[in-house]
């Protein structure tokens, strides 16, 4: 086992209004407490839509819940005439710790390119947020270039040209595995994670490579999570659909119950 703390991250995507979000977080906190989840050993974060963040933050704060808050995106700008954009400064003010950057759904539906993603990573560092840099190949890219080439290219661009590199997390999410029920094999996920770590070693440093958590995402369920986390290379999971179901997500948080080391 590596000494990196596993991170279980639930990306709600565009699901749950703020009232539904509060209900889910309350139930999740009770359920994890009931099963004596040790948050010092396995970190659990939720990534609600922007409109839920204030409500969820207030709940976490008032009830002193050990859950961590993440956001799904941020602007590359700090403030100004950018209608519809959300500044990293606003997220920080809401005790947001993590922010997804470059999720494949943003790359695909909002045409986010590597340059914009690099600027968003810079903005996250600037506002003391931890970017969760999402990388992954499409089915066509998998067939033409293999599994690791595109994720390595995307990560290299996201990490290029920063004056200072703060803490970050990488999420390897093969596009063909998102919401499809198709999953990468645990060997594929571990192999790409290992190559991404080598990329960090080359681009940043040995120390940062050793400390950075690399997650797998794409159709993760309580029934398959353990397979991904047996490898020392994979330090957690980024969960979409299954994070909306408290029992499923709790099962994922308790992956160590299924991992036989
Ligand atoms: P699913 O778990 O629904 O496949 O989504 C994965 C994902 O995109 C998480 O960011």
Image (cartoon, grey):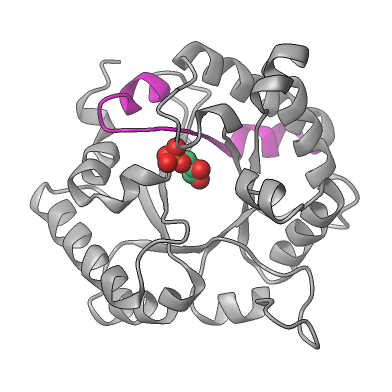
Query: Residue 32 lies in magenta, yes or no?
Result: no
Image quadrant occupied by the C terminus: top left
Residue 128: image quadrant is bottom right
Q: Whole-percent x and y of residue 256?
A: 26, 30
| Drawn side of residue 130 relative to residue 238, left or right | right
Q: Can residue 240 be seen in this view?
A: yes
For the image shown, how many numbered marks are present on the structure?
0
Examine the rendered structure and indicate whether residue 39 appears above or below residue 50: above
Examine the rendered structure and indicate whether residue 123 appears above or below residue 138: below
In terms of depth relative to the viewer, which is nearer, 154 or 214?
Answer: 154
Examine the rendered structure and indicate whether residue 154 appears above or below residue 86: above
Task: Please identify the residue farthest to the left as the structure is shown.
Answer: 34
Q: Give the range drawn in magenta.
A: 204-229
Q: Whole-percent x and y of residue 46?
A: 40, 58
Query: Residue 223 lies in magenta, yes or no?
Result: yes
In terms of depth relative to the viewer, which is nearer, 211 or 252?
Answer: 252
Q: Which residue is drawn at 50% across and 11% down?
A: 187
Q: Residue at x 59, y 32 (%)?
A: 175
Q: Whole-percent x and y of residue 124?
A: 69, 64
| Drawn side of residue 44 relative to residue 186, left or right | left
| Drawn side of residue 22 relative to residue 188, left or right | left
In terms of depth relative to the viewer, which is nearer, 110 or 86?
Answer: 110
Image quadrant occupied by the N terminus: top left
Q: Is residue 237 visible?
A: no
Q: Residue at x 24, y 47 (%)?
A: 38
Examine the rendered structure and indicate whether residue 197 appears above or below residue 120: above
Q: Whole-percent x and y of residue 216?
A: 50, 32
| Drawn side of residue 150 relative to residue 69, left or right | right
Residue 68: image quadrant is bottom left
Q: Which residue is drawn at 47% across and 33% down?
A: 218
Task: Please identify the residue farthest to the bottom as the structure is shown.
Answer: 80
Residue 28: image quadrant is bottom left
């Amino acid at each position: 086992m590596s000494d990196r703390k596993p991170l279980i991250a639930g990306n709600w995507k565009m699901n749950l209004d703020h009232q539904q979000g509060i209900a889910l977080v309350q139930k999740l906190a009770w359920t994890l407490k009931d099963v004596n989840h040790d948050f010092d050993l396995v970190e659990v974060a939720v990534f609600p839509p922007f409109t839920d963040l204030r409500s969820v933050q207030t709940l976490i704060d008032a009830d002193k819940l050990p859950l961590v808050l993440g956001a799904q995106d941020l602007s590359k700008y700090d403030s100004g005439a950018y209608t519809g954009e959300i500044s990293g400064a606003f997220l920080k003010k809401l005790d947001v710790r993590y922010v997804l950057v470059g999720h494949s759904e943003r790359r695909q539906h909002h045409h986010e390119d590597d340059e914009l993603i690099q600027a968003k990573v810079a903005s996250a560092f600037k506002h003391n947020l931890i970017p969760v840099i999402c990388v992954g190949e499409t089915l066509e890219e998998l067939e033409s270039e293999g599994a690791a080439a595109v994720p390595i290219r995307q990560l290299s661009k996201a990490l290029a040209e920063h004056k200072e590199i703060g803490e970050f997390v990488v999420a390897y999410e093969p596009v063909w595995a998102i919401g499809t029920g198709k999953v990468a094999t645990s060997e594929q996920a571990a192999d790409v994670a290992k190559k991404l770590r080598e990329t960090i070693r080359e681009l940043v440093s040995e120390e940062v490579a050793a400390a950075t958590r690399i997650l797998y995402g794409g159709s993760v369920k309580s029934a398959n999570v353990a397979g991904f986390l047996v490898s020392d290379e994979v330090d957690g999971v980024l969960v979409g659909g299954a994070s909306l179901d408290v029992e499923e997500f709790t099962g994922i948080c308790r992956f160590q119950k299924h991992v036989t080391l």
